[in-house]
Amino acid sequence: MPVILEPARELPVAAEYDVLVCGAGPAGVAAALAAARAGAKTGLVEVHGCLGGIWTAGLLAYFLDTANKTGIMAEIIAELDRRGAHAHDSQGRPTSAFDVEEVKILLEDLCREAKVDIRLHTRVVQTRVENGRLTHAIIEDKSGRRALAARTFVDCTGDGDLAALAGCGFDVGHPETGATQPFSLIMLVGGIRRAEVRPYFREGNEPWADAKERLRERMAAGGCDPSYGRPSLFPVRDDLFILMSNHEYQFNGLCAEDLTAATLKARRELHDQINGLRAQGGIWQDIRILATADQIGVREGRRIHGRHTVTLDEMLAGVRHEDAVCRVTFGIDVHSTNPHATKGIEGSKHRTQPYDIPLRSLIARDVEGLLMAGRCISGDFLAHSSYRVTGNAAAMGEAAGRYAASC
């Protein structure tokens, strides 16, 4: 591949913070709020035009593993409930689904109230490390290439971009094959009514399988057998639904070309799925896509090396830690890495217990002044498939932000 030499240049330091959080998904927002509320001057950098990450830019406002979470995660749920943005089933019981637009504005309200300095449409592209300590994140935005200085940094980019740029070691994918879980592009749909499509989603403690299989059969009947073999419909309001029905296999979440190709392929499939349902008439005659996600959902990126690695053995034993920041109750959840074997969830022979994530797994091993939160913390392949869901990400982010402020 041909190369060019980029000339050296002086970069202005646009701001200096006590804590700089990179990535404003569930982990990043919680980290920024915790740091700012603890009195630290806090910056929050986000590549998209909204806060919330997979909840908002990714349209998956479906919160998992939150029942045992307190603090900021519980606060967000309570406030969404107060604002009428929390979905309830036909019996009036709260579900795990929320209104995406209400999530966006709530997170902005909370961060503004805490005086977090928000920088949207901003990407971290390089770092400066001095004597083994991270001192600056170099960003690019509409104003150009600049630097942000901080005493402590928190990588909440999901893929561990900040840590990797700073020189931290990391692992990616299955330890033997390097395979990673598929992407999923989420959509919001309308034009259907909850009561009419009741056979196609779960309520309460009903099993998932039957409703998902019925929906898969309808999609297949419309000419588009979904790439995700367990398509899932989540009611938000009577006429608003989140729909996850797509898998993009054998793409690399760290490759720009793969992200582009997978997104284009996925969006075409989503439109084919909905067009096929609508063509069948009946309860589907008015179904429409209201939005497809700006960001395809990437389940796996880098797992940054920390001072402790969360492992399968700890999950099996239900390990407790004195420096625990989060107790995970979600089990192993590996979406198929091989569509020829299954297009759903890979089976597991392991029976896990609720287990702790220690603060040490959030502290970078190779660079000083750097913490991680969310799916890029230090863990093995199977542990990652459990702790990566957003209820845990928010809890980790809150702990990282609080610790960063104390530093």
Image: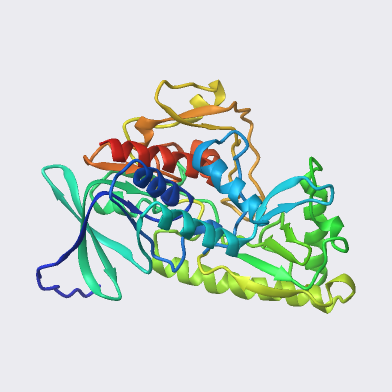
The residue under the point 72% across, 63% down is 241
State the residue in front, 165 or 20: 20
**Vertical placement of 363 versus 111: above or below?**
above
Quick check: 259 left or right of 211? Answer: left
Compared to residue 326, the image places residue 8 above or below, namely below
Tell me residue 130's x, y (percent): 12, 47
Residue at image x 15%, y 42%?
132
- Left or right of 382? Residue 94 is right
Q: How is the image coloured?
A: rainbow
Q: Is residue 120 visible?
A: yes
- Percent x, y for residue 402? 36, 38
Residue 301 appears in the rendering? no
Residue closer to the observer: 345 or 23:
23
Q: Quadrant of the C terminus?
A: top left
Residue at 41%, 20% in the rendered image: 322
- Residue 337 position in % (x across, y down): 56, 51
- Quadrant in which the N terminus is drawn: bottom left
